[in-house]
Image (tube, grey):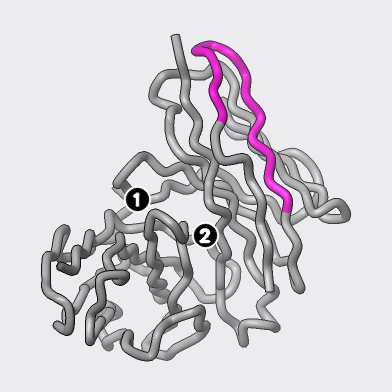
Amino acid sequence: GQNIDQPTEMTATEGAIVQINCTYQTSGFNGLFWYQQHAGEAPTFLSYNVLDGLEEKGRFSSFLSRSKGYSYLLLKELQMKDSASYLCAVRENVVLTGGGNKLTFGTGTQLKVEL
Amino acid sequence: DSGVTQTPKHLITATGQRVTLRCSPRSGDLSVYWYQQSLDQGLQFLIQYYNGEERAKGNILERFSAQQFPDLHSELNLSSLELGDSALYFCASSVASAQETQYFGPGTRLLVL
C-alpha cells in the first residue's frame, strides 16, 4: 500500500516563493506527480519526477529524493491565481498493478496567496 | 482544457437509484481512469481501462462498474446509490497504459438525496 503526507494548508505572499512538501511510503515506487486543482475543477498536471533531483518548469520546480521518500514543489514569483490545492501523487510499480498506471493521491495542500 | 470530456456536468438523484457517467478520452489516448473525490476522502483511484480491457483496480465498490467501448469512450455505472456516494467523479486519460501522465476531465458532480 501507499501512504502520502502533505501539509493541509499554507499561506504565502504574492511575489514570494513557497515550498510544498510531500512525504510518501510505498511498496513499489514508479514516479511522483504534482497536480494543481482549483476548487470544483479538474486537477491539472504540473510536474513529474521519477529520478532523484530537480525538474524545473518555468515558475514551478519539483524535487525528488527516492531514498528519503520525499518530494517538494517550489513555486516562485507567486501570483494570486496560484491560490489552489496542490496534490502530490505517487504511481505504483507497474509489476504490482499488472501493467496498470495507478496513482495514489495525497489529500492536497491548500495554498492561499495574499497581497 | 485537457481534451477529456465528461457528461453530465451535474447529476442529482435519489438513494437507491442507478446512474451512468460518461467519459471521452483525449484523441489518441487508449487508457481511461476513473477517480472519486469527496470532501473527506480526497481523490481516490477507482479503476483503469486500456484499449477496452480492465488494467488496474482501486477501492471500487461492488455497486460500481465500468467499461470501455471500442471507440474508447468509457462509462462508469453507479447503482444502489447511497448518500455517501455524493462526490465529484473525474475521468482521466493517457496515451498508453503504464508510464504516461494522466490528464483529467472536468468531472461530474453527483448529488444523492
Q: Does residue A58 show up?
A: no
Tell me the chain of label 1: A
At a point 39% along the width and 54% down the height, the residue shown is: B39
At a point 59% along the width and 21% down the height, the residue shown is: A76
Q: Amino acid at mark 2?
A: Thr
Position of residue B110 measured from the top left corner of the image (x, y, whole percent): 21, 64
Displayed quadrant of residue A96: bottom right
Give the residue at the far right of this rendering.
A67
Tell me the chain of label 2: B
Q: Does residue B37 show up?
A: yes
Q: Quadrant of the C terminus of chain A?
A: top left
Q: Nearer the viewer, residue A70 or B110?
A: B110
Decide if residue B20 is on the left or right side of residue B66: left
Position of residue A11 measured from the top left corner of the image (x, y, whole percent): 54, 23
Q: Which mark is residue A88?
A: none
Q: Main secondary structure of the magenta part?
A: strand
Residue beneath label 1, please?
A42
Within 10 Å of the Cα at label 2, are there few (<14), some (14-19), or many (20+) other Cα atoms?
A: some
At a point 77% along the width and 48% down the height, the residue shown is: A70
Q: Up-down: is B101 above or below A47?
A: below
> Magenta residues?
A10-23
Residue beneath label 2, please?
B101
Q: Secondary structure at mark 1?
A: loop
Q: Is residue B40 magenta?
A: no
At a point 33% along the width and 52% down the height, the residue shown is: B2
Q: Up-down: is B48 above or below B62?
A: above
Q: Amino acid at mark 1?
A: Ala
Q: Up-down: is B12 above or below B55?
A: above
Within 10 Å of the Cα at label 1, are there few (<14), some (14-19), or many (20+) other Cα atoms?
A: many
Displayed quadrant of residue A27: bottom right
Displayed quadrant of residue A18: top right
